[in-house]
Image (spheres, grey):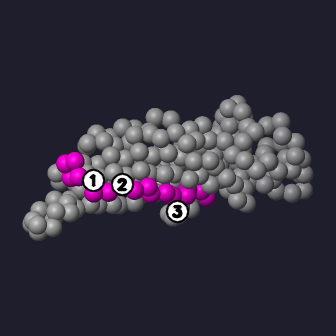
Amino acid sequence: MGDSGVSLDLSHGFNRVVDSWFELFKSEVSTPNATPACAYPGGWTESQIDEARNNSQSTWWSLRWNQSQRATDSMWATRYALVKIEWDLKVQWQTVIWSKADYEHPDEEPPVYDFIDNAVASVELLDSGSLSLTVHAAFGHPTFTDKVAQLPVYFKVQCYDGDTPLRDELRSFLITGDGERQRLG
Protein backbone atom coordinates (compact mmCIF):
# COMPACT_ATOMS: atom_id res chain seq x y z
CA MET A 1 0.00 0.00 0.00
CA GLY A 2 3.00 2.31 0.03
CA ASP A 3 2.37 3.39 3.63
CA SER A 4 5.43 2.24 5.59
CA GLY A 5 4.39 3.47 9.04
CA VAL A 6 3.22 1.26 11.88
CA SER A 7 -0.33 2.61 11.69
CA LEU A 8 -2.50 4.63 9.33
CA ASP A 9 -3.40 8.29 9.72
CA LEU A 10 -7.03 8.08 10.82
CA SER A 11 -7.33 11.73 11.82
CA HIS A 12 -9.82 12.28 9.00
CA GLY A 13 -11.87 10.01 6.79
CA PHE A 14 -13.01 9.76 3.19
CA ASN A 15 -16.63 9.19 2.09
CA ARG A 16 -17.41 9.51 -1.63
CA VAL A 17 -20.98 10.77 -1.01
CA VAL A 18 -20.52 12.87 2.12
CA ASP A 19 -23.34 15.38 2.76
CA SER A 20 -25.25 14.49 -0.44
CA TRP A 21 -28.99 14.02 0.10
CA PHE A 22 -30.70 11.23 -1.83
CA GLU A 23 -34.45 10.94 -2.30
CA LEU A 24 -35.27 7.39 -1.25
CA PHE A 25 -39.04 7.42 -1.24
CA LYS A 26 -41.87 9.62 -2.47
CA SER A 27 -45.57 8.82 -2.82
CA GLU A 28 -45.22 5.02 -2.83
CA VAL A 29 -42.25 5.07 -5.23
CA SER A 30 -38.93 3.82 -3.89
CA THR A 31 -35.72 5.19 -5.43
CA PRO A 32 -32.54 3.17 -4.95
CA ASN A 33 -29.54 4.85 -3.31
CA ALA A 34 -27.35 5.01 -6.46
CA THR A 35 -23.87 5.66 -5.04
CA PRO A 36 -22.84 3.78 -1.90
CA ALA A 37 -21.12 5.57 0.97
CA CYS A 38 -17.82 4.49 2.51
CA ALA A 39 -15.41 5.24 5.35
CA TYR A 40 -11.70 4.93 4.54
CA PRO A 41 -8.63 6.90 5.65
CA GLY A 42 -8.72 10.42 4.22
CA GLY A 43 -5.40 10.24 2.38
CA TRP A 44 -6.22 7.07 0.44
CA THR A 45 -6.69 7.03 -3.33
CA GLU A 46 -9.27 4.91 -5.16
CA SER A 47 -6.50 2.44 -6.11
CA GLN A 48 -5.57 2.00 -2.42
CA ILE A 49 -9.25 1.46 -1.58
CA ASP A 50 -9.53 -1.12 -4.39
CA GLU A 51 -6.41 -2.90 -3.14
CA ALA A 52 -7.81 -3.02 0.41
CA ARG A 53 -11.13 -4.40 -0.88
CA ASN A 54 -9.38 -7.08 -2.90
CA ASN A 55 -7.02 -8.16 -0.09
CA SER A 56 -9.33 -8.36 2.89
CA GLN A 57 -12.18 -10.20 4.53
CA SER A 58 -15.63 -8.68 4.64
CA THR A 59 -18.83 -8.91 6.65
CA TRP A 60 -22.28 -7.47 5.92
CA TRP A 61 -24.41 -5.64 8.50
CA SER A 62 -27.83 -4.00 8.50
CA LEU A 63 -30.01 -1.65 10.52
CA ARG A 64 -33.81 -1.59 10.35
CA TRP A 65 -36.01 0.83 12.22
CA ASN A 66 -39.78 0.46 11.96
CA GLN A 67 -41.94 3.59 12.06
CA SER A 68 -45.62 4.36 11.59
CA GLN A 69 -47.95 7.33 11.51
CA ARG A 70 -51.71 7.55 11.96
CA ALA A 71 -54.07 10.19 10.69
CA THR A 72 -54.51 12.85 13.39
CA ASP A 73 -58.06 14.01 12.69
CA SER A 74 -59.55 13.49 16.17
CA MET A 75 -63.15 14.14 15.02
CA TRP A 76 -63.22 10.81 13.24
CA ALA A 77 -62.08 8.16 15.72
CA THR A 78 -62.61 5.36 13.20
CA ARG A 79 -60.38 7.14 10.66
CA TYR A 80 -57.65 7.46 13.30
CA ALA A 81 -58.00 3.76 14.12
CA LEU A 82 -58.02 2.54 10.51
CA VAL A 83 -55.78 4.93 8.53
CA LYS A 84 -52.09 4.28 9.10
CA ILE A 85 -48.87 4.34 7.11
CA GLU A 86 -45.98 2.09 8.19
CA TRP A 87 -42.43 1.85 6.86
CA ASP A 88 -38.94 0.62 7.67
CA LEU A 89 -35.85 2.84 7.46
CA LYS A 90 -32.91 0.63 6.47
CA VAL A 91 -29.13 0.82 6.09
CA GLN A 92 -26.91 -1.99 4.81
CA TRP A 93 -23.12 -1.80 4.84
CA GLN A 94 -20.08 -3.95 4.31
CA THR A 95 -17.15 -4.07 6.71
CA VAL A 96 -13.77 -4.41 5.02
CA ILE A 97 -11.50 -6.06 7.60
CA TRP A 98 -8.00 -5.08 6.48
CA SER A 99 -4.42 -5.28 7.75
CA LYS A 100 -1.22 -4.24 6.01
CA ALA A 101 0.30 -7.04 3.95
CA ASP A 102 3.76 -5.45 4.16
CA TYR A 103 3.78 -4.87 7.94
CA GLU A 104 7.37 -4.19 8.99
CA HIS A 105 7.45 -6.00 12.36
CA PRO A 106 7.45 -9.78 11.72
CA ASP A 107 7.42 -10.58 15.45
CA GLU A 108 4.09 -8.73 15.94
CA GLU A 109 0.61 -9.19 14.56
CA PRO A 110 -0.25 -6.36 12.15
CA PRO A 111 -2.98 -3.95 13.27
CA VAL A 112 -6.45 -4.75 11.92
CA TYR A 113 -8.73 -1.99 10.61
CA ASP A 114 -12.51 -2.16 10.10
CA PHE A 115 -13.49 0.12 7.22
CA ILE A 116 -17.01 0.69 5.88
CA ASP A 117 -17.87 0.17 2.22
CA ASN A 118 -21.02 -0.15 0.09
CA ALA A 119 -23.28 1.56 2.65
CA VAL A 120 -26.74 2.16 1.20
CA ALA A 121 -29.91 3.54 2.74
CA SER A 122 -33.40 2.47 1.74
CA VAL A 123 -37.05 2.59 2.73
CA GLU A 124 -39.57 -0.24 2.64
CA LEU A 125 -43.24 0.70 2.69
CA LEU A 126 -45.21 -1.85 4.72
CA ASP A 127 -48.71 -0.28 4.83
CA SER A 128 -49.73 2.89 3.03
CA GLY A 129 -53.28 3.66 4.13
CA SER A 130 -54.24 6.97 2.52
CA LEU A 131 -51.25 8.90 3.86
CA SER A 132 -48.15 9.88 1.88
CA LEU A 133 -44.48 9.57 2.77
CA THR A 134 -41.30 11.27 1.56
CA VAL A 135 -37.86 10.15 2.81
CA HIS A 136 -34.41 11.53 2.00
CA ALA A 137 -31.09 10.16 3.33
CA ALA A 138 -27.51 11.42 3.62
CA PHE A 139 -24.25 10.01 4.92
CA GLY A 140 -21.93 12.29 6.90
CA HIS A 141 -18.21 12.58 7.53
CA PRO A 142 -16.55 9.37 8.74
CA THR A 143 -14.43 9.18 11.88
CA PHE A 144 -12.34 6.43 13.44
CA THR A 145 -12.14 5.07 16.99
CA ASP A 146 -9.64 2.32 17.83
CA LYS A 147 -9.12 1.47 14.11
CA VAL A 148 -12.89 1.11 13.57
CA ALA A 149 -14.69 3.35 11.07
CA GLN A 150 -17.82 5.23 12.15
CA LEU A 151 -20.26 6.73 9.66
CA PRO A 152 -23.33 8.85 10.47
CA VAL A 153 -26.47 8.39 8.37
CA TYR A 154 -29.39 10.82 8.40
CA PHE A 155 -33.00 10.25 7.34
CA LYS A 156 -35.38 13.18 6.74
CA VAL A 157 -38.91 11.80 7.09
CA GLN A 158 -42.02 13.71 6.02
CA CYS A 159 -45.53 12.29 6.26
CA TYR A 160 -48.70 13.99 4.99
CA ASP A 161 -52.44 13.50 5.15
CA GLY A 162 -53.37 15.19 1.89
CA ASP A 163 -51.74 18.63 2.24
CA THR A 164 -51.62 18.47 6.05
CA PRO A 165 -48.15 17.70 7.43
CA LEU A 166 -48.19 14.99 10.11
CA ARG A 167 -44.46 14.45 10.54
CA ASP A 168 -41.32 16.34 9.49
CA GLU A 169 -38.30 15.06 11.37
CA LEU A 170 -34.68 14.06 11.12
CA ARG A 171 -33.63 10.58 12.31
CA SER A 172 -29.88 9.99 12.74
CA PHE A 173 -27.85 6.84 13.29
CA LEU A 174 -24.17 6.01 13.68
CA ILE A 175 -23.03 2.80 11.98
CA THR A 176 -19.59 1.31 12.59
CA GLY A 177 -17.17 -1.03 10.89
CA ASP A 178 -17.60 -3.62 13.62
CA GLY A 179 -21.38 -3.79 13.09
CA GLU A 180 -22.46 -1.59 15.97
CA ARG A 181 -25.27 0.88 15.40
CA GLN A 182 -26.83 3.50 17.60
CA ARG A 183 -29.43 6.21 17.28
CA LEU A 184 -28.08 9.74 17.52
CA GLY A 185 -30.03 12.53 19.15
The reply to whether the C-beta atoms of the residues labelled 2 and 1 are less than 8 Å apart is yes
**Circle 3 residue:** 184
> Residue 140 at what x, y percent from top left?
57, 48
Figure check: 35 above or below 65: above
Q: Earlier in the sequence, mark 3 or mark 1?
A: 1
The chief SS type of the magenta part is strand
- From this viewpoint, is residue 85 visible? yes
- Range of the magenta residues? 161-178
Residue type beneath disc 1:
Pro
Which circle marks residue 165 in the picture? Answer: 1
Q: Residue at x 83, y 36 (%)?
A: 2
Figure check: 153 above or below 27: below
Label 1: state its secondary structure: strand
**Circle 2 residue:** 168
Q: How busy is the neighbourhood of tag 1: few (under 14 within 10 Å), some, or many (20 plus)?
A: few
Q: Residue at x 82, y 50 (%)?
A: 7
Q: Residue at x 33, y 60 (%)?
A: 67
**Is residue 138 found inside the magenta-colored segment of the image?**
no
Q: Earlier in the sequence, mark 2 or mark 3?
A: 2
Which circle marks residue 118 in the picture? Answer: none
Q: Residue at x 71, y 52 (%)?
A: 113
